[in-house]
Amino acid sequence: DWRNGAAYPTNGYQWSWTSRLAMPGHIKFFNYFKTDFDISWYTPLIGEDTLVLCLHGHAGLIKTLKNKNAPWIELFHVGGPASVRGYNYGQIGPTWKEDNSLGALKMLIFNAELIFPIAADRSMRGIVFYDGGAGWDTPLANEMSPKNLSNNNFFYRFHVVIKNIFIF
């Protein structure tokens, strides 16, 4: 983490790469490898904190091993306030009957934000943002009826908000 602040960064970047290997143990039907990469970059465009650009990307992959599976909670559920705002949790990925997230084995998210202070003490900020992403390839596809399965292929969707105010 090389940002100049955690609460209101205006310059710098942070990145993380996590991987995990789940071997079958007392729960014999889980065996998978999961890895994801996350990066954010901040730079001031006007002044030190008058207008800040933030670019964020997150990509992930899960590989199931030996005909086993990954638990639902470990799958990628793209959509919602933590990934692509303007969509419901898991809506941008494989769903069952249009609105129940099944989880995806592959995921890609991109966010761009222009952040500007509204109050001089930075207690109120405005954000113009672009969010986009996709989640695809559910491990449950072979067990589902095609008429009940939606969004299992790569389909990039996005959302843009021109004005939004956050008070901190």
Image (cartoon, rainbow, N blue to C red):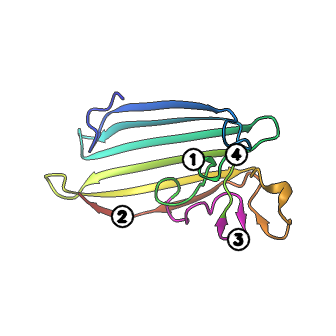
Query: Magenta residues, as a range?
Result: 85-100
Q: Secondary structure at mark 1?
A: strand
Q: Residue furthest left?
A: 121
Picture coordinates of residue 153, whole percent (x, y): 77, 53
Camera-nearest label, 3 or 1: 3
Q: Earlier in the sequence, mark 4 or mark 2?
A: 4
Q: CA distance from mark 2 to mark 1?
A: 20 Å
Camera-nearest label, 4 or 2: 4
Q: CA distance from mark 3 to mark 1?
A: 21 Å
Q: Is residue 143 left or right of residue 76?
A: right
Question: What amino acid type is highlighted by mark number 3?
Answer: Glu
Q: CA distance from mark 3 to mark 4?
A: 18 Å
Residue 10 or residue 107, whichever sits in front: 107
Q: Disc 1 designates what residue?
A: 109
Camera-nearest label, 2 or 1: 1
Q: Disc 2 designates what residue?
A: 164
Q: Disc 4 designates what residue?
A: 105
> Which quadrant of the view contains residue 24?
top right
Residue 98: assigned label:
3
Residue 90 in magenta? Answer: yes
Q: Is residue 160 left or right of residue 42?
A: right
Q: Earlier in the sequence, mark 3 or mark 1?
A: 3
